[in-house]
Amino acid sequence: MYRTSPFDTFSHAAGGASSACRKKGAQVRRNSIFTKRWVKGSAVLVATAATLVFANPQQAIATPLKGVDSATVSQSASNVVDIDFADGIKGRITFLEDGIFRYNVDPKGEFSDYATPRSKSHTAKIQAQPDTSDTYSKPSATVADKGDTIEITGGKATVILDKATGKMSIKSGDRVVVSESASLDLDKKGTVQTLAKEKSENFFGGGTQNGRFLHTNQTIAISNTNNWTDGGVASPNPFYWTSDGYGVLRNTFAEGSYDFGSTDSSTVTTLHSENEFDAYYFVATNEGASNVATEMLQDYYKVTGNPVLLPEYGFYLGHLNAYNRDGWSTTSGQKKWETKGSKSSSEKGDVKYESGMSTGYKLDGTLAAETLNGEGPSVDTENMKATDFDRQFSARQVIDDYEDNDMPLGWFLPNDGYGAGYGQNGYYKTGGVNSDGTSSADRLNAVRANVDNLKKFTEYANSKGVSTGLWTQSNLEPDSNSETPWHLLRDFDAEVKTGGHLYP
């Protein structure tokens, strides 16, 4: 099967309770003892506080939350607590494990099991199983009135709700691990949670935040910024955890942002572009960074499912880039690249210039061509105009550079770029499609030559202990478009046999 190179961007404490309230169905009133509150999962995004009014008077709300009217252990599930906030806002807390619970505040009172995807065609879910699954032990909940607050306990975790403001705090045993410094703010444009930040508290998570893993005093985007370099966000995840012993997984696909002390060093502000709060909370039972990290990840995977076990090469550095497309020079070009290797940052490195870097770029005879192996094409070469095929601009040279600088390289994708292919045979030659959609012998011959080019690179990479693969996408199909340049056609069966099995 042959088609153009299909590169694509892939665009996720135990507190005491009154014995009178241990009975299933015990209820707490705002002017009484107990109150409960639940927030529905969310992905961080900043929103402006505003008044949100629904057509149904019972759903009319003024943001932020104004207080708690009552909290009651559900008659249908002993691990669930239903909360009535002021102005008719509904909440729910569901205890799943010792230290894992879900907090949901839904102005509509629907409490959906799963987050709404951003596209109707998407079927992915954040959780690996529903909250009712037997996977969870579901510790029974108790509700206790403590005067100005209501304490809701399940296992070793206790959720404390302030009756007057609805502000929430969480305890692990007798230790408070997190507290809201402002009432939860629900709005048409987004939901904002404001938390107190401790001076020594550090923050981690957020998915693939390129070049960063420690987010203390920073703001991170929970959205795909389509930027794969330092500072960009390639694969966001609405999950974060802190060294103080708690983690939050927002059950949402809505875009968001998390401010971990960037605006105010004493405050954490998380926002998602939806007017519902839905989050899974993970509460560590032990202190210490190592213990907390272990517990947070174990709890996270309990909800989302175990991660994929990578092959051995996946634990090493990987190199992904486009070859067989751009033009290079050591004197001038569109983009300057400086490689310092083992030199100090103050020393001048080796400089190269790259031009093209986009689909449709065509060499015009003024620059050297980049390649996989430092070799030019041998089949249908009439449109190839390059000064040379210098090995210094090849994928092989990149492997050598890693080795020369003692940087262990595990895997390599040599076609990670739009319009990059894996060879230059049949360079910008078109046609060769028969009336029945099959390819002519010449068209197929160019593809075979490019597969051979890939095979040579694979053999070289393997000899250096590096595994190879190719960037591809879903919905692959034969290409019978006569306008597709031959050097961009692909043989998927041959790729797997000669280019490796490393498909992302």
Image (cartoon, rainbow, N blue to C red):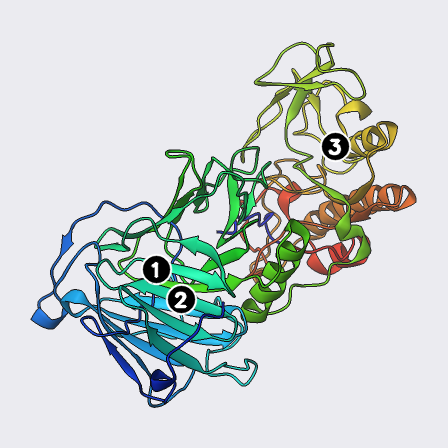
The amino acid type found where label 2 is placed reads Val
Earlier in the chain: of badge 2 and badge 1, it is 2
* Left or right of residue 416: residue 347: right
The earlier-in-sequence mark between 2 and 3 is: 2
Q: CA distance from mark 2 to mark 1?
A: 7 Å
Q: Position of residue 262 (x, y in %)?
A: 42, 34
State whether residue 385 appears in this view. yes
Residue picked out by circle 1: 168
Please tell me which residue is depicted at 48% across the width and 66% down the height of the picture. Answer: 126
Q: Residue furthest right?
A: 463
Mark 3 lies on a secondary structure that is loop
Q: Nearer the viewer, residue 62 or 276?
A: 62
Give the label, 1 or 3, closer to the camera. Answer: 1
Image quadrant in which you'd find residue 337:
top right
Callout 2 touching callout 1 (CB < 8 Å): yes
Count residues near mark 2 (Cα–Cα under 10 Å), then give few for <14, some for 14-19, many for 20+. Answer: many
Residue matched to label 3: 371
